[in-house]
Image (cartoon, rainbow, N blue to C red):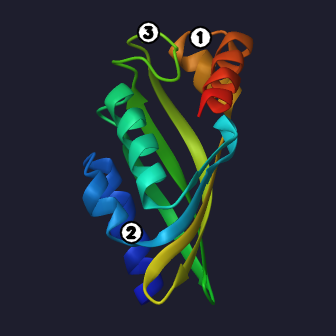
Amino acid sequence: MSENIDVVRAYAEAKSRADVPAALSYCHPGAVFETIAFQAVANGIEEAARQFTGFLRAFPDYHVDLDYLVEAGELVIGSGTIRATMKMSLAGIEPTGGTYALPFACHWTVRDGLIAHERFFFDFHQMCEQLGLSTDAAADRFAAWRKAA
């Protein structure tokens, strides 16, 4: 196993424990985190801490199952399944108590042993469907959340 893959695996495990400080300890202070499905970008550790904390409050049992991680220089590419139950509101969306299990793909840029960039992909529509949410209404809530942020 490579050092870059070890860093990504440790980061994913910390997020699965809802341990935001531990997860972010594997990241550069100026790291950029993109969640494509939410059209959300967090620039830096402080912004990421706020977003991660809000997300993990809404989905306290969030868990990442990694199927594979592959390294290509500074780039680590991975895929697996994310699972969670919506217990609290997120971006003004009321909790449904529903659970999702979604395939995901992600790539991380690792520099100097720390994550410098994360780009996280999963199907927003499938997440909404599994949670019992209207995709259009949820997309509108995320748009308003992004505008307010």
Amino acid carrying mark 3 in the image: Thr
Residue at position x 38%, y 12% in the image: 97
Q: Is residue 80 visible?
A: yes
The quarter in which the C terminus is drawn is: top right
Q: Is residue 1 visible?
A: no
Q: Picture quarter containing residue 119? A: bottom right
In depth, the one of 23 and 101 nearer the eye is 23
Q: Pick whichever of labels 2 and 3 is earlier in the sequence.
A: 2
Helix, strand or loop at label 3? It is loop
Percent x, y of residue 75: 63, 79
Percent x, y of residue 144: 67, 21
Q: Residues within 10 Å of mark 1 (few under 14, many from 20)?
A: some
Answer left or right for 53 relative to 73.
left
Is 36 located above or below residue 99 in the figure? below
Helix, strand or loop at label 1? It is loop
Residue that label 2 marks: 9
Q: Residues within 10 Å of mark 3 (few under 14, many from 20)?
A: some
Percent x, y of residue 54: 39, 34
Residue that label 3 marks: 96
Residue that label 1 marks: 133
Question: Is mark 1 in CB contact (under 8 Å) with mark 3?
Answer: yes
Is 118 located above or below residue 58 in the figure? below
